[in-house]
Image: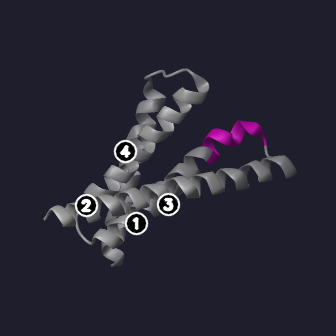
Amino acid sequence: MKEKNLNNTTYVMKGLALSLLLTMFLIFILSLILLYTPFKESNIPLFNTIIMIVSITIGSIYASIKIGEKGWINGGIVGVVYFIILVLLNYLFMKSLVLDLYLTGKFILSLITGIIGGIIGINMK
């Protein structure tokens, strides 16, 4: 049982790592698009939200496929930990942490996206 829990944790962490790497790659692509096209910088929050949703979904799908059970829990964990890491990075570099409706909405969106990704991953297996 202990070995199974360790494997599950490993797959959740791999799904999280996949999500974060995908986020970095997509933000790099977004920065190139913003540099070489006439997109406005006012669209950055929308694109960041889309990147977050795609990254959490793919990481949750990966973790759920590998674990093979309880996809909604494992996907939700990927989404919540992803969100916590982003908040910590934001606090580290921006030095401001305001608990407001926007941050709460992002948390709920991360959780729901992770749950949906986990459910999709279980059904893909």
Identity of the amino acid at label 4? Val
**Among numbered discs 4 and 1, the one appearing first in the sequence:** 1
| Residue that mark 3 sits on | 18
Residue 36: x and y in percent read 86, 51
Which residue does the image show at 40% across and 66% down from the upper left? 61
Residue 107: x and y in percent read 40, 39
Which residue does the image show at 39% across and 45% down from the upper left? 81
The mark found on residue 61 in the picture is 1
Q: Residues within 10 Å of mark 2 (few under 14, many from 20)?
A: few
Q: Is residue 36 above or below residue 7?
A: above
**Local SS, label 3:** helix
Q: Which of the 4 image quadrants contains residue 114?
A: bottom left
Q: Which numbered mark, 3 or 4, is in the foreground of this view? A: 3
Q: Name the side, left or right, on which 24 lies relative to 62.
A: right
The mark found on residue 9 in the picture is none
| Marks 3,4: beta carbons within 8 A | no
| Residue that mark 4 sits on | 80
Q: Name the side, left or right, on which 125 lies relative to 85.
A: left
